[in-house]
Image: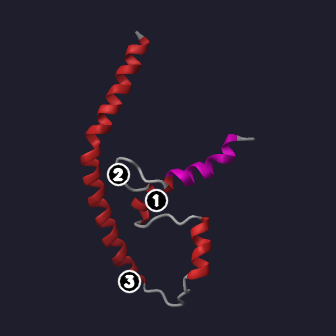
Amino acid sequence: MDWASFLPLALFAIRRVANRSTGFSPHELVFGRKMRGPLDLLYAGWVEEIYSEFDVDGWVESLQEKLKVLHDLTVANEELIGPVVEKEIEKMLNACINCSE
């Protein structure tokens, strides 16, 4: 089996899972909402009504508000987790340096 054939699945998983330092998935930070997977879409087709009219202006305003909140929360999470991650990286680098001696 060619490893490159698994890249789309790996990227899907990476983009969907929340990052420890930000607290949000990459998809959520870019698009302002959680990523919907195949099962989410199938379920939505069963239970949600489909609207023929879509309020684009309201959607854009809502998206801007969500992205602002996500930005603020990401900065706060990074400030909390950043020092912990830095210590972990320092430990790994020290371990690598000690291994080469």
Q: Residue shown at 43%/53% (left/top)?
A: 18
CB-based contact (under 8 Å), mark 3 and mark 2? no
Coordinates of residue 48 in the picture (x, y in percent): 55, 82
**Secondary structure beneath label 2:** loop
Q: Residues within 10 Å of mark 3 (few under 14, many from 20)?
A: few
Q: Quadrant of the C terminus?
A: top left
**Numbered mark located on residue 57 in the image:** 3
**Residue 81 found in image quarter:** top left
Q: Residue shown at 54%/52% (left/top)?
A: 13
CB-based contact (under 8 Å), mark 1 and mark 3? no
Question: Mark 2 sits on what residue?
Answer: 22
Instruction: Write down the region rendered in magenta.
Output: 3-14
Three-letter residue code for mark 2: Thr
Question: Mark 1 sits on what residue?
Answer: 27
Coordinates of residue 96 in the picture (x, y in percent): 41, 20
Three-letter residue code for mark 3: Asp
Q: Residue shown at 61%/67% (left/top)?
A: 39
Q: Nearer the viewer, residue 38 or 54?
A: 38
Q: Does the magenta stretch include residue 41?
A: no
Q: Is residue 7 magenta?
A: yes
Taking the image as shown, residue 69 lies to the left or right of residue 57, namely left
Tell me which numbered mark, 1 or 3, is placed earlier along the sequence: 1
